[in-house]
Image (cartoon, coloured by chain):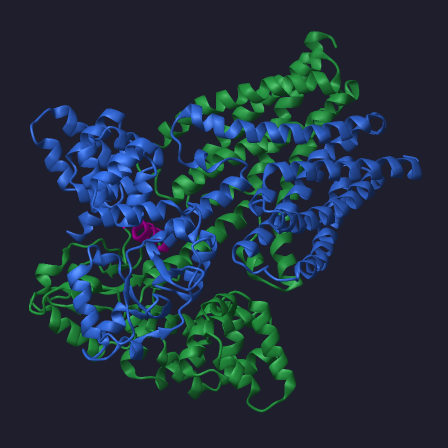
Chain colours: A blue, B green
Amino acid sequence: MNESRRQKARNAHEVAAAIRAATRSHVPGALQGLISGYHPIDIAYAMTELSGEERAAVFELLDAAASGVVLEEVDDEIGEEMLEATEEGELAEIIDAMPPDVGADAVSLLSAEVRHRILNRIPRDEAEEIASLLAHSEDSAGGIMTSEVIAAPPDVTALGVIRHIRRTVVHPEAISRVYVVDRDRRLVGAVSIATLINARDDQPLQKLMEPDPVAVHPDTDQEEAVRLVDRYDLPSLPVTDDEGRLLGAITVDDVIDVLQHEANEDLAYVAGTSVDDLTSKSTWRTARARVPWLLISLGASLLSASVIKLFSGTLQEAVLLAAFIPVITAMSGNSGLQSSMVTVRSLALGLLKGPRLITLVLRQLPVALLVAVACGVTGMAAGVLVLGHPGYGLIVGTAMFCAICLGTLMGSLVPLVFDRTGVDPALASGPFVTTVNDAISLLIYLSIATGMLRLLRL
Amino acid sequence: MNESRRQKARNAHEVAAAIRAATRSHVPGALQGLISGYHPIDIAYAMTELSGEERAAVFELLDAAASGVVLEEVDDEIGEEMLEATEEGELAEIIDAMPPDVGADAVSLLSAEVRHRILNRIPRDEAEEIASLLAHSEDSAGGIMTSEVIAAPPDVTALGVIRHIRRTVVHPEAISRVYVVDRDRRLVGAVSIATLINARDDQPLQKLMEPDPVAVHPDTDQEEAVRLVDRYDLPSLPVTDDEGRLLGAITVDDVIDVLQHEANEDLAYVAGTSVDDLTSKSTWRTARARVPWLLISLGASLLSASVIKLFSGTLQEAVLLAAFIPVITAMSGNSGLQSSMVTVRSLALGLLKGPRLITLVLRQLPVALLVAVACGVTGMAAGVLVLGHPGYGLIVGTAMFCAICLGTLMGSLVPLVFDRTGVDPALASGPFVTTVNDAISLLIYLSIATGMLRLLRL
């Protein structure tokens, strides 16, 4: 039984195939029966495999709660399409059944006009909460928080809070902590639900609470918020305004979503493409996501072409040296990629805050030298071996040493400069910077070659 | 007040500086006073900045609970060093105070001999739990689960379970769900703590539970377990044996740690370095992590050098064509990186399970053609512009078209082949594969050049 559940948890293709078969069978009730047997999230995963028509048929048969889960899970593109196909009365019901933060995400997919009509159809409190959540930027703590938090004064007893939760809370699954606030709703403490269960009925929150819990401002970047949750293993992170008043909280499932999104974004930037490319299924959109990045690096690589053209005299003299052009660019690029990745991750983990940027770059210097010496010596040997002349080996080895020093230092420095100027540092590991790196290392290689050829009279 | 806490939460450098100053001041009690004012996790983050001596001084002053938190958070290397410096009686106390999964992680850092003595010093149940956790592989669900779960039969009432938790649970913060088991401890349901709080005192768990919760086997890969928690927004994931008996559960904070580790690993592989490089602070270890990867790609790039050497006759004839060597390799490499990244992420998200691998590669074909045409045409224009001859433009454009088709298809295919043969697919985006890609695309470029030069009699 358990085993079958485990299996079911995985295979979106099979769920999609079963749905498609049920749709085609035209047996009355077949699709409805099938759908109610699946977890809504499995249906959401299968949605991407289905056609627009099949999706609409499935979505129509879901109840409000399940529709909410499906909407939360599918790509915005598909969600938008499903929302547009749904009758407004039903839509209002679905959104009303969602926790406010999820409802706000769904509503944000609607056109301003439809949004206005929908918000008018759902209960006033819920509509106001959604409207206030919509005011925050999507990438901020305010944008991912839920306003559905339990707040209680410090003198309330454990039993009192538990009774309050029983009476008022609509989505109890989402609650992991009770927040303690003063008369002005300023956050003064936090009590975990587990602590509450362990408490004597008459104990006041004041005695149970962890005072001054870590909190963030709604404008805080979502990545910073996620960092705090990860760092302190928080069950939820309160969001407070300038006066320290409680506005909402960020729950752990949102944190996991942000982490996954961030990992996608970093990888996409490093690969020189957009996050869109990772989620899109359409040929046209995928190509459109990739081509601009490739054209940018094509433009940048023409720098390398110009450098080589500039030195065509040298190459005419010693055409064998052309053989090491891809070796030099690969090594300089790879060493740059290594050190930029370390800088990018350190920035992401918040390890490079503070005034020690220069110290950190200086710390890379001995690493750069060690790595450059190791590769320079091997490069020299390879040069002698492949090109069959010690002089050529000397040229290759020296150039490789310089190119790797350059690559390692550029790799450490460029992400820091990007970060300081407000550009995502992960872009520094992308193809554009790597290609510029190529051009500079070729300039070094061919300059050294020209000089040495003359010096050694090869 | 809240603001100061937010500040304090961030700055490991400042915490380290304060600790260093207190150590140097030699004022009795200064360090102790300072340390008790910080969150243990902030102390853990500051540890990497301190010297071995300073670390030992700080660690000695922490109480058992705080020592546990610090040990859990610091790198294994530092943890090992601190454990070795601690007296065994105290060590046993610290490990006893930890939740069993954290205790097992700490104990695994000790030598077999010390481990044995420590396990003998702590209470029997705890020692047995730790020993059974140690039996699982570190990267498996069993390796990250905690055995500290609440299990209760289906006929127990809500109040009964709550009383049981109050009596028996040592680390209530970690509990988010109660698991319902039958007589043979087979898992039959799960009840969230929040549901429990919302229930009437006399309601039996049977009425409250979600039946057949998603569960994993202890040998399940930790990444698969994390995927399930993310997918179903689970507060914790139960681990069951072959007979469906409950062994333990994976908590959300462990999931977040695995996600962070995975993101690091993927980025490290793509950058052609090891995870060690991202955490190590020693020059020597950093260099040692990087050099082998660079030497491997140096070896691979000699393939490119040999290809060019093979065609030195052609280059002697038309040396200007050397100018486009780095352009062709950059474009083939970048297009390959884009598509490999998409495959790697799809594999990580479990989207490519099932028999449709070939379908998926075929789906890349139109993308490859579209991208290759766009870049081929631009490449031709660039060739004419930089090299000043339409014939050269034709050579560059044709080669770029072929190189990008090759790069895109290799990028989609190689990670799949790696995955099928049990190699981490993220390695396919690393420098080695890229460099092999370089060599093949140069072979194409220079073959086309040789053929066309003859054909067009340039």
| Residue pictured at 33% horizontal, 43% vertical | A105
Front-lying residue, B378 or A2: B378
Q: Is residue A408 above or below residue A452?
A: below
Q: Is residue A458 above or below residue A377?
A: above
Residue A87 position, x and y percent, is 19, 30
Q: Is residue A292 above or below residue A390?
A: above
- Residue B97 shown left or right of residue A373 in the figure: left
| Residue A45 visible in the displayed image | yes
> In which quadrant will I find the C terminus of chain B?
top right
**Magenta: main secondary structure:** helix
In the rendered image, residue A311, in percent from the top left (x then y), is placed at 82, 29
Of A289 and B348, which appears nearest the observer? A289
Q: How many numbered marks have been drawn onto this rendered protein structure?
A: 0
Depth order, front residue of B15/A386: B15
| Magenta-span inclusion, residue B226 | yes
Q: Residue furthest front?
A: A184
Q: Position of residue A213 (x, y in %)?
A: 40, 69
Q: Is residue B283 left or right of residue B276?
A: right
Q: Residue at x 15, y 24 (%)?
A: A24
The image quadrant that residue B120 belongs to is bottom left
State the residue at coordinates (86%, 27%): A317
Q: Which residues are magenta?
A: B222-232
Report which quarter residue A21 is drawn in: top left
